Amino acid sequence: MKITLDELRAWVVVVDTGSITAAAEQLTQTTSGISRALSRLEKKLQTTLMHRTTRRIALTEEGQLFLEHAREILRTVESAEEQIAQRREIPSGRLRINAATPFMLHVIVPLLNEFTARYPLIQLELNTDDVVIDLLEQQTDIAIRIGELRDSTIHARALGYSKLRLMASPEYLAKYGTPASVADLANHRLLGFSQLEQHNLWPVWQREGEFLPIAPSVSASSGETLRQMAVYGQGIVRLSDFMSREDCVTGRLVPVLADVTRDMHHPIHAVYYRNVTLSLRIRCFLDFLSECITQRGLL
C-alpha cells in the first residue's frame, strides 16, 4: 500500500470544501480525477472514508480518524518545504569541512571569526586528515585537497597554487651550517613525509630538469608535524608558503638554497559532491574562502 501525497491532498480538500467539484476547482483538476484519487485511497486503505450523496459528504468513523493523520502528514511536508525554501535564502545548517592539518590551522582557522560573523546560522564542523578521504563515507560537505585531483566523480573549485620552498631554523643552521649547494644537503638532516612519497620531491634539481628525491632523516605523516620539527631545529624541511609565511616574518624559519630553488607548485582545490543544486551554505563558504585567498594572498 503506497499512498501518495496527491491522494492525501485531494481527500483533505474534498473534506474541507465539502464537494468533489469544489475540490477539483481549488486543485485545478477534473472532478473525475479527484473522484479516482479518492477511490484509489479507499482501495489502498481497504475501508470506506466517506458517504457521498448529491447534497453532502459524511465521514465514516474511519474517515474521521484518517483525516487527522492526513492533515498531520501534509503539515509536516509543507513545513519541510518551507524550511528548505528558507535555507535557500538564508544560509544555515551544519557544514562539514575536511582539510589537511596545515591548511586547516594556517588558512581556515584564522578566517573563522569573520566567517561566523557573516553567516551566524551556519554551524561548522572541522575535521583534519593528512590523507585523501571519501566524502560520502566521512559525511563531508567540502574537502580541501592539495595536489593533482584524480577522482573524476567529484566537483571542484580551484583555490590557487601553493609554492614550495626549503626552510630551516636559524638555530639549526648556526649549529650545522648553511648548505651552499644541492650536494651539501647530503650532509644535513632532512625532514620528509612517511606516507606521501610524492611530497619527498624537493624544489631543487639533482640534474637538469629533475627535482631532487630525498630519503628523510626523520619522517612524519603530517606536514604540520614537519613544520614544528623544523621550527625546533630538527632539520631542513620543504614547506608550502601558506604554512611558513608567519614563521618567515617572525624569523623562526629562513629560506635555504633560495638561489637554486626551482618553481614547484601544488594546486589546491575545494572538492564536493553535487547532485542537483549546491546548498547555499556550501556556496557561501566556497565564495568566502576564494575571496579571502584571492584578496589577501593567503597561498
Image (spheres, rainbow, N blue to C red):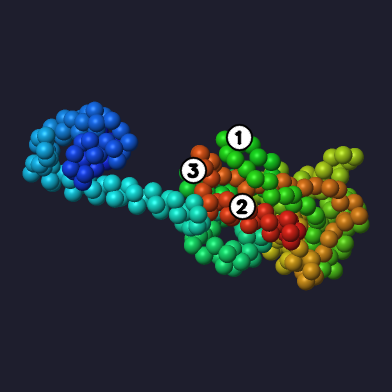
Disc ID at residue 152: 1
Q: Quadrant of the C terminus?
A: bottom right
Q: Position of residue 155 (x, y in %)?
A: 60, 40
- Dot 1 or dot 3: first in sequence order is 3
Q: Nearer the viewer, residue 92 or 53?
A: 53
Question: In this picture, is 91 found above or below 156?
Answer: below
Q: Nearer the viewer, residue 2 or 163?
A: 2
Task: Answer left or right for 6 relative to 95.
Answer: left
Amino acid type for the residue under numbered disc 3: Leu
| SS of the residue under disc 3 | loop
- Residue at (81, 45) in percent of width and height: 212
Task: Answer left or right for 50 relative to 104.
Answer: left
- Dot 1 or dot 2: first in sequence order is 1
Farthest residue in the bottom direction? 250
Amino acid type for the residue under numbered disc 2: Leu
Disc ID at residue 136: 3
Task: Answer left or right for 18 relative to 290.
Answer: left
Disc ID at residue 296: none
Closer to us: mark 1 or mark 2?
Answer: 2
Q: Quadrant of the N terminus?
A: top left
Q: Position of residue 282 (x, y in %)?
A: 55, 51
- Dot 2 or dot 3: first in sequence order is 3
Q: CA distance from mark 2 to mark 3?
A: 19 Å
Question: In this picture, is 214 found above or below 101?
Answer: above
- Residue at (45, 54) in percent of width and height: 86
Amino acid type for the residue under numbered disc 1: Ser
Disc 2 marks which residue? 286
Farthest residue in the left direction? 61
How many other residues sit within 10 Å of disc 2, few (<14), some (14-19) or many (≥20)?
A: some
How many other residues sit within 10 Å of disc 3, few (<14), some (14-19) or many (≥20)?
A: few
Q: Nearer the viewer, residue 206 or 293?
A: 293
